[in-house]
Image: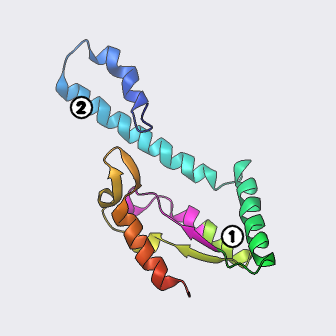
Amino acid sequence: RHLRDNQIFEGFRSVLSRWESHSISWFVERMARKQVSQDTIEWYRRMYTDNEGWPQTKDLIAGMHEFCEARNIEMILVVFPLFIHLEEYPLVEAHQLLGQFSRQHGMQHIDLLEIFAGKNERDYWVHPRDFHPNSRAHREAADFLYSAITW
């Protein structure tokens, strides 16, 4: 099953089938998708708070950095934004937290939000139902990284 399938809407199908109204179906599906979007954003926000996963993630990133430093390998933490609501990006705090973490651990950090902020996220989706970055997003990120990194 596709990750973006609207499971909330599925629960309403039996109720909606009583009326056979396209308008009501459209409205309920729209409201359900809005709820899925809000739940998804909240899930990502919780990932960067005091939960059992975040300390483990920080330890893993710090460990990778230590591993690289011990071998004279340059490590740069590159953060890709989620391609949602780029006009008013809801996860700015998570990006700031990752930047702060990087600075505290002496890591180089590049946040790609700065090149995508304010743009239309739909221009960067693989598919209207799959919000992963498409070739255009990867091209813009690669061009930015090429100029931002001292090679």
For residue 61, what is the image quadrant? bottom right
Q: Which residue lies furthest to the top in this view?
A: 18
Disc 2: which residue: 26
- Compared with residue 58, is residue 150 higher up or lower down, i.e. above or below? below
Query: Could you classify mark 2 by the number of other residues whose Cα lies within 10 Å: few (under 14), some (14-19), or many (20 or more)?
Result: few
**How has the structure been colored for display?**
rainbow
Circle 2 SS class: helix
> Left or right: where does residue 43 sit relative to residue 38?
right
* Residue at image point 75% right, 54% down: 56
- Compared with residue 41, is residue 124 higher up or lower down, i.e. above or below? below
* Residue at image point 66% right, 75% down: 75
Q: Give the range drawn in magenta.
A: 76-96
Question: Residue 102 in the image: x percent, y percent?
Answer: 67, 73
For residue 55, what is the image quadrant? bottom right
- Compared with residue 50, is residue 14 higher up or lower down, i.e. above or below? above
Tell me if I can see residue 87 in this picture. no
Question: Residue 93 in the image: x percent, y percent?
Answer: 56, 64
Q: What residue type is labelled 2?
A: Trp
- The mark tally for this picture is 2
Image quarter of the C terminus? bottom right
Question: Residue 137 in the image: x percent, y percent?
Answer: 38, 65
Question: Residue 24 in the image: x percent, y percent?
Answer: 23, 26
> Left or right: where does residue 73 sit relative to residue 136?
right
Question: Which of the numbered marks, if any, corresponds to residue 3?
Answer: none
Q: Which amino acid does label 1 sit on?
A: Phe
* Residue at image point 30% right, 37% down: 30
> Left or right: where does residue 130 sit relative to residue 64?
left
Disc 1: which residue: 101
Q: Distance between the residues labelled 2 and 1?
A: 43 Å
The verdict on residue 83 being magenta is yes
